[in-house]
Protein backbone atom coordinates (compact mmCIF):
# COMPACT_ATOMS: atom_id res chain seq x y z
CA UNK A 1 0.00 0.00 0.00
CA UNK A 2 1.43 3.39 -1.04
CA UNK A 3 2.06 6.15 1.46
CA UNK A 4 -1.18 7.84 2.45
CA UNK A 5 -1.95 11.39 1.44
CA UNK A 6 -3.09 14.09 3.84
CA UNK A 7 -6.46 15.74 3.42
CA UNK A 8 -9.91 14.82 2.14
CA UNK A 9 -10.14 12.14 -0.58
CA UNK A 10 -12.16 12.95 -3.73
CA UNK A 11 -15.91 12.93 -3.04
CA UNK A 12 -16.56 10.51 -5.91
CA UNK A 13 -14.38 7.87 -4.27
CA UNK A 14 -16.12 8.31 -0.93
CA UNK A 15 -19.59 7.99 -2.46
CA UNK A 16 -18.62 4.77 -4.24
CA UNK A 17 -17.07 3.37 -1.04
CA UNK A 18 -20.25 4.21 0.93
CA UNK A 19 -22.45 2.46 -1.61
CA UNK A 20 -20.24 -0.64 -1.73
CA UNK A 21 -20.13 -0.85 2.05
CA UNK A 22 -23.87 -0.23 2.45
CA UNK A 23 -24.90 -2.65 -0.32
CA UNK A 24 -22.27 -5.27 0.43
CA UNK A 25 -20.49 -5.48 -2.90
CA UNK A 26 -18.89 -3.77 -5.86
CA UNK A 27 -21.51 -5.03 -8.34
CA UNK A 28 -24.39 -3.50 -6.39
CA UNK A 29 -22.54 -0.19 -6.07
CA UNK A 30 -21.80 -0.23 -9.80
CA UNK A 31 -25.51 -0.73 -10.53
CA UNK A 32 -26.50 2.16 -8.24
CA UNK A 33 -24.15 4.59 -9.98
CA UNK A 34 -24.42 3.23 -13.53
CA UNK A 35 -20.74 2.30 -13.58
CA UNK A 36 -18.89 -0.86 -14.47
CA UNK A 37 -17.67 -3.10 -11.66
CA UNK A 38 -14.12 -2.38 -12.79
CA UNK A 39 -14.71 1.36 -12.41
CA UNK A 40 -16.00 0.87 -8.87
CA UNK A 41 -13.06 -1.36 -8.02
CA UNK A 42 -10.61 1.23 -9.35
CA UNK A 43 -12.17 4.07 -7.32
CA UNK A 44 -12.02 2.04 -4.13
CA UNK A 45 -8.42 1.01 -4.86
CA UNK A 46 -7.57 4.70 -5.34
CA UNK A 47 -9.22 5.51 -2.00
CA UNK A 48 -7.31 2.73 -0.24
CA UNK A 49 -4.06 4.04 -1.70
CA UNK A 50 -4.92 7.57 -0.59
CA UNK A 51 -5.70 6.43 2.96
CA UNK A 52 -2.91 3.87 3.17
CA UNK A 53 -5.39 1.31 4.48
CA UNK A 54 -7.21 -1.70 3.04
CA UNK A 55 -10.98 -1.14 3.28
CA UNK A 56 -12.25 -4.37 1.68
CA UNK A 57 -11.16 -7.99 1.72
CA UNK A 58 -11.36 -9.37 -1.83
CA UNK A 59 -12.36 -13.03 -2.02
CA UNK A 60 -13.66 -15.31 -4.74
CA UNK A 61 -17.20 -15.16 -3.37
CA UNK A 62 -17.23 -11.37 -3.05
CA UNK A 63 -15.92 -8.60 -0.84
CA UNK A 64 -16.32 -7.71 2.82
CA UNK A 65 -15.28 -4.73 4.89
CA UNK A 66 -12.09 -4.87 6.89
CA UNK A 67 -11.98 -3.59 10.47
CA UNK A 68 -10.78 -0.24 9.13
CA UNK A 69 -13.56 -0.26 6.53
CA UNK A 70 -16.22 -0.96 9.14
CA UNK A 71 -14.93 1.91 11.26
CA UNK A 72 -14.74 4.33 8.32
CA UNK A 73 -18.14 3.56 6.77
CA UNK A 74 -20.43 5.23 9.38
CA UNK A 75 -18.16 8.30 9.41
CA UNK A 76 -18.44 8.63 5.64
CA UNK A 77 -22.21 8.03 5.72
CA UNK A 78 -22.79 10.69 8.39
CA UNK A 79 -20.61 13.18 6.51
CA UNK A 80 -22.30 12.62 3.16
CA UNK A 81 -25.76 12.89 4.71
CA UNK A 82 -24.81 16.10 6.51
CA UNK A 83 -23.40 17.55 3.28
CA UNK A 84 -26.55 16.66 1.35
CA UNK A 85 -28.84 17.98 4.07
CA UNK A 86 -26.99 21.27 4.50
CA UNK A 87 -26.72 21.81 0.74
CA UNK A 88 -30.47 21.34 0.44
CA UNK A 89 -31.10 23.73 3.32
CA UNK A 90 -28.90 26.44 1.80
CA UNK A 91 -29.64 26.13 -1.91
CA UNK A 92 -32.70 23.89 -2.33
CA UNK A 93 -36.11 25.20 -3.25
CA UNK A 94 -39.00 24.99 -0.85
CA UNK A 95 -41.10 21.86 -1.48
CA UNK A 96 -43.98 22.55 -3.86
CA UNK A 97 -45.82 19.24 -3.42
CA UNK A 98 -47.02 17.16 -0.50
CA UNK A 99 -48.17 13.65 -1.36
CA UNK A 100 -49.71 11.41 1.29
CA UNK A 101 -51.09 7.87 1.18
CA UNK A 102 -53.56 6.11 3.44
CA UNK A 103 -56.77 4.16 3.64
CA UNK A 104 -59.66 5.91 1.93
CA UNK A 105 -61.48 6.33 5.26
CA UNK A 106 -58.40 7.96 6.79
CA UNK A 107 -57.93 10.31 3.85
CA UNK A 108 -61.61 11.28 4.07
CA UNK A 109 -61.80 11.71 7.85
CA UNK A 110 -58.32 12.99 8.73
CA UNK A 111 -56.75 14.65 5.67
CA UNK A 112 -59.72 16.28 3.95
CA UNK A 113 -60.87 18.35 6.96
CA UNK A 114 -57.36 19.71 7.57
CA UNK A 115 -56.67 20.90 4.02
CA UNK A 116 -58.08 24.45 4.31
CA UNK A 117 -55.85 25.20 7.30
CA UNK A 118 -52.80 23.58 5.71
CA UNK A 119 -53.25 25.35 2.36
CA UNK A 120 -53.59 28.64 4.18
CA UNK A 121 -50.22 27.97 5.82
CA UNK A 122 -48.70 26.72 2.56
CA UNK A 123 -50.49 28.49 -0.33
CA UNK A 124 -47.84 27.45 -2.90
CA UNK A 125 -47.96 23.72 -2.06
CA UNK A 126 -50.06 21.26 -4.05
CA UNK A 127 -51.50 18.38 -2.00
CA UNK A 128 -51.93 14.97 -3.62
CA UNK A 129 -53.45 11.88 -1.98
CA UNK A 130 -53.12 8.20 -2.82
CA UNK A 131 -55.76 5.83 -1.43
CA UNK A 132 -54.97 2.19 -0.67
CA UNK A 133 -57.52 -0.56 -0.22
CA UNK A 134 -55.85 -2.43 2.65
CA UNK A 135 -53.44 -1.51 5.42
CA UNK A 136 -51.03 -4.18 4.24
CA UNK A 137 -50.77 -2.34 0.91
CA UNK A 138 -49.03 0.58 2.64
CA UNK A 139 -45.81 -1.46 2.89
CA UNK A 140 -45.68 -1.63 -0.92
CA UNK A 141 -46.92 1.92 -1.55
CA UNK A 142 -44.43 4.18 -3.36
CA UNK A 143 -45.75 7.30 -1.67
CA UNK A 144 -43.45 7.58 1.33
CA UNK A 145 -45.52 9.92 3.52
CA UNK A 146 -48.40 7.87 4.95
CA UNK A 147 -51.23 7.88 7.47
CA UNK A 148 -51.21 4.64 9.45
CA UNK A 149 -53.26 3.11 12.25
CA UNK A 150 -51.49 1.27 15.06
CA UNK A 151 -49.15 1.85 17.97
CA UNK A 152 -46.55 3.95 16.15
CA UNK A 153 -43.86 1.30 15.81
CA UNK A 154 -42.97 0.41 12.23
CA UNK A 155 -39.38 -0.72 11.50
CA UNK A 156 -37.44 1.88 9.56
CA UNK A 157 -40.12 4.57 9.88
CA UNK A 158 -40.56 7.66 12.01
CA UNK A 159 -44.08 8.30 13.30
CA UNK A 160 -45.89 11.29 14.80
CA UNK A 161 -49.22 10.81 16.55
CA UNK A 162 -52.19 12.57 14.99
CA UNK A 163 -54.87 11.31 17.39
CA UNK A 164 -55.27 8.52 19.92
CA UNK A 165 -58.02 6.04 19.14
CA UNK A 166 -61.07 6.43 21.40
CA UNK A 167 -64.22 4.37 20.86
CA UNK A 168 -67.64 5.54 22.01
CA UNK A 169 -71.23 4.42 21.36
CA UNK A 170 -72.72 6.76 18.77
CA UNK A 171 -75.80 6.82 16.57
CA UNK A 172 -77.90 9.02 14.31
CA UNK A 173 -80.09 11.63 16.05
CA UNK A 174 -83.15 9.99 17.56
CA UNK A 175 -81.54 6.53 17.79
CA UNK A 176 -80.84 5.55 21.37
CA UNK A 177 -79.47 2.68 23.40
CA UNK A 178 -81.55 -0.43 22.86
CA UNK A 179 -81.49 -0.08 19.08
CA UNK A 180 -79.67 -2.86 17.20
CA UNK A 181 -75.90 -2.70 17.36
CA UNK A 182 -73.72 -2.08 14.33
CA UNK A 183 -70.79 -4.47 14.68
CA UNK A 184 -67.29 -3.72 13.41
CA UNK A 185 -64.89 -6.63 12.97
CA UNK A 186 -61.12 -6.28 13.06
CA UNK A 187 -58.29 -5.58 15.47
CA UNK A 188 -60.05 -2.79 17.35
CA UNK A 189 -61.82 -3.68 20.60
CA UNK A 190 -65.47 -4.55 19.95
CA UNK A 191 -68.75 -4.43 21.77
CA UNK A 192 -67.84 -7.28 24.12
CA UNK A 193 -64.65 -5.49 25.18
CA UNK A 194 -66.61 -2.28 25.71
CA UNK A 195 -69.27 -4.09 27.77
CA UNK A 196 -66.64 -5.72 29.98
CA UNK A 197 -64.93 -2.36 30.61
CA UNK A 198 -68.27 -0.59 31.20
CA UNK A 199 -69.61 -3.32 33.51
CA UNK A 200 -72.66 -3.98 31.34
CA UNK A 201 -74.05 -7.50 31.07
CA UNK A 202 -76.73 -7.33 28.40
CA UNK A 203 -76.10 -5.94 24.93
CA UNK A 204 -78.71 -5.31 22.24
CA UNK A 205 -78.41 -7.67 19.27
CA UNK A 206 -76.17 -6.84 16.30
CA UNK A 207 -78.05 -6.82 13.00
CA UNK A 208 -75.19 -5.88 10.66
CA UNK A 209 -71.42 -6.42 10.80
CA UNK A 210 -68.70 -4.64 8.82
CA UNK A 211 -64.97 -5.16 8.40
CA UNK A 212 -64.43 -1.42 8.00
CA UNK A 213 -64.85 1.28 10.63
CA UNK A 214 -65.79 3.74 7.91
CA UNK A 215 -68.63 1.52 6.71
CA UNK A 216 -69.83 0.88 10.27
CA UNK A 217 -69.95 4.62 10.99
CA UNK A 218 -71.80 5.24 7.71
CA UNK A 219 -74.40 2.59 8.64
CA UNK A 220 -74.98 4.24 12.02
CA UNK A 221 -75.29 7.63 10.33
CA UNK A 222 -78.09 6.18 8.19
CA UNK A 223 -80.00 5.15 11.31
CA UNK A 224 -79.23 1.43 11.20
CA UNK A 225 -78.22 1.24 14.86
CA UNK A 226 -75.58 2.11 17.44
CA UNK A 227 -71.92 1.81 16.51
CA UNK A 228 -68.89 1.66 18.77
CA UNK A 229 -67.36 4.36 16.66
CA UNK A 230 -63.93 5.92 16.35
CA UNK A 231 -63.99 9.49 17.64
CA UNK A 232 -61.14 10.65 15.33
CA UNK A 233 -62.79 9.15 12.25
CA UNK A 234 -66.29 10.35 13.13
CA UNK A 235 -65.33 13.78 14.51
CA UNK A 236 -66.70 15.70 11.52
CA UNK A 237 -70.05 13.91 11.63
CA UNK A 238 -70.26 14.41 15.39
CA UNK A 239 -69.60 18.14 15.01
CA UNK A 240 -72.26 18.66 12.36
CA UNK A 241 -74.87 16.57 14.19
CA UNK A 242 -75.10 13.64 11.75
CA UNK A 243 -74.05 11.42 14.65
CA UNK A 244 -74.50 11.84 18.40
CA UNK A 245 -72.48 10.39 21.25
CA UNK A 246 -74.68 8.44 23.61
CA UNK A 247 -74.41 9.08 27.34
CA UNK A 248 -72.39 5.91 27.87
CA UNK A 249 -68.74 5.21 28.83
CA UNK A 250 -65.97 5.61 26.27
CA UNK A 251 -63.28 3.01 25.63
CA UNK A 252 -59.71 4.28 25.27
CA UNK A 253 -57.25 2.10 23.36
CA UNK A 254 -53.49 1.80 22.90
CA UNK A 255 -53.74 2.47 19.16
CA UNK A 256 -53.88 5.70 17.27
CA UNK A 257 -53.57 7.42 13.89
CA UNK A 258 -50.04 8.40 12.89
CA UNK A 259 -48.27 10.36 10.18
CA UNK A 260 -45.25 8.25 9.20
CA UNK A 261 -42.29 8.42 6.83
CA UNK A 262 -39.03 6.48 6.23
CA UNK A 263 -36.28 7.38 8.68
CA UNK A 264 -33.84 8.37 5.93
CA UNK A 265 -36.32 10.29 3.75
CA UNK A 266 -36.75 13.66 5.50
CA UNK A 267 -33.25 15.08 5.24
CA UNK A 268 -33.64 18.83 4.99
CA UNK A 269 -35.06 21.46 7.32
CA UNK A 270 -37.45 22.57 4.57
CA UNK A 271 -38.93 19.08 4.20
CA UNK A 272 -39.20 18.73 7.97
CA UNK A 273 -40.93 22.11 8.24
CA UNK A 274 -43.45 21.08 5.58
CA UNK A 275 -44.27 17.88 7.45
CA UNK A 276 -44.51 19.78 10.75
CA UNK A 277 -47.04 22.19 9.21
CA UNK A 278 -49.06 19.29 7.80
CA UNK A 279 -49.01 17.54 11.17
CA UNK A 280 -50.18 20.72 12.90
CA UNK A 281 -53.12 20.94 10.49
CA UNK A 282 -53.96 17.25 10.98
CA UNK A 283 -54.07 17.72 14.74
CA UNK A 284 -56.39 20.69 14.34
Image (spheres, grey):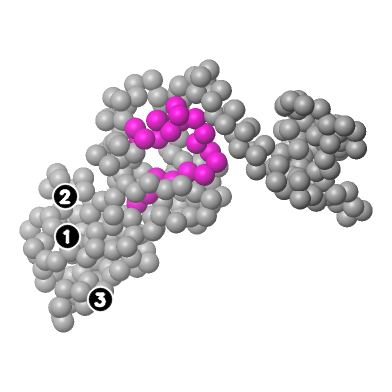
Q: Residues within 10 Å of mark 1 (few under 14, many from 20)?
A: many
The answer to whether residue 254 shows anywhere in this view is yes
| Residue nearer the viewer, 191 or 76 | 76
Q: Which mark, by number, is residue 99?
A: none
| Residue tagged 1 | 170
| Residue nearer the viewer, 249 or 233 | 249
Mark 1 in CB contact with mark 2 (< 8 angstroms)? yes
Mark 1–mark 3 Cα distance, whole angstroms, equals 16 Å
Is residue 41 positioned above or below 168 on the image?
A: above
In primary-sequence order, the first of circles 1 and 3 is: 1
Q: Residue at x 44, y 27 (%)?
A: 270
Q: Is residue 19 left or right of residue 58?
A: left
Q: Quadrant of the N terminus?
A: top right
Q: Is residue 272 magenta?
A: yes
The answer to whether residue 103 shows anywhere in this view is no
Report the span colored magenta: 257-278
| Residue tagged 2 | 238
Q: Residue at x 16, y 49 (%)?
A: 238
Is residue 212 positioned above or below 235 on the image?
A: below
Q: Residues within 10 Å of mark 2 (few under 14, many from 20)?
A: some
Mark 3–mark 2 Cα distance, whole angstroms, equals 24 Å
| Residue nearer the viewer, 66 or 216 | 66
* Quadrant position of residue 219: bottom left
Judged from the image, the secondary structure of the residue bearing numbered disc 3 is: helix
Q: Is residue 243 magenta?
A: no
Q: Which mark, by number, is residue 192?
A: 3
Give x and y (percent) for residue 137. 51, 53
Give x and y (percent) for residue 178. 11, 71
Amino acid sequence: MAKKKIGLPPLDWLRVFEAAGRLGGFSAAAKEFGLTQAAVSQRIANLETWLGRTLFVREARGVSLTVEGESYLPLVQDSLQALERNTEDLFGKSPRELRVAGLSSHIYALVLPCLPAFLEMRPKVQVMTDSVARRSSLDEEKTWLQIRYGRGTWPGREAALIAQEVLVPMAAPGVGWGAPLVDQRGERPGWRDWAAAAGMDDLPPARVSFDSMGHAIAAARQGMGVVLGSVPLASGQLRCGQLCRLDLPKLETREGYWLTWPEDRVRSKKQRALIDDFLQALRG
